[in-house]
Amino acid sequence: MAIIHGGRGTVYTAAYSGKPAIGFPLHQEQQYNLDSLVRNGAAIRLSHKFFKRKKFIEAVNKIFNH
């Protein structure tokens, strides 16, 4: 599992490694990059602005249970 910000390099690395990711985009293009992974079932996108520990733990558990 990777925790990434959604930049092009980190998205490529996560995708090519075959590892699921949790992403916290900081800019619009990072959101778009992460959404590409989300659409393909390879990531979960969370908000850094409205970060909630509970949501993060739920995302981690979801990845490890699938």
Image (cartoon, rainbow, N blue to C red):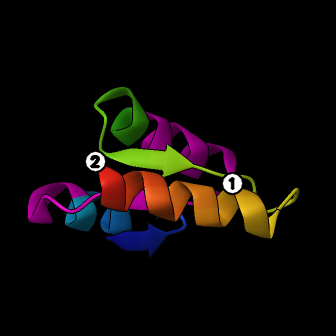
In the picture, the quarter occupied by the N terminus is bottom left
Tell me where residue 19 sits by quadrant: bottom left
Q: Secondary structure at mark 1?
A: loop
Q: Is residue 32 left or right of residue 25?
A: left
* Discs 2, 1 touching: Cβ within 8 Å: no
Q: What amino acid does circle 1 point to?
A: His
Q: Point out the stretch of residues depicted in magenta.
A: 15-35
What residue type is disc 2 on?
A: His
The stretch drawn in magenta includes residue 18: yes
Residue at horizontal 22%, vertical 67%?
A: 13
Answer with left or right where residue 9 lies relative to residue 52: left
Helix, strand or loop under label 2: loop
Residue 66 placement (x, y as % from top left):
28, 47
Residue that numbered label 2 is attached to: 66
Residue 43, image x and y in percent?
Answer: 39, 48
Q: Nearer the viewer, residue 13 or 64?
A: 64
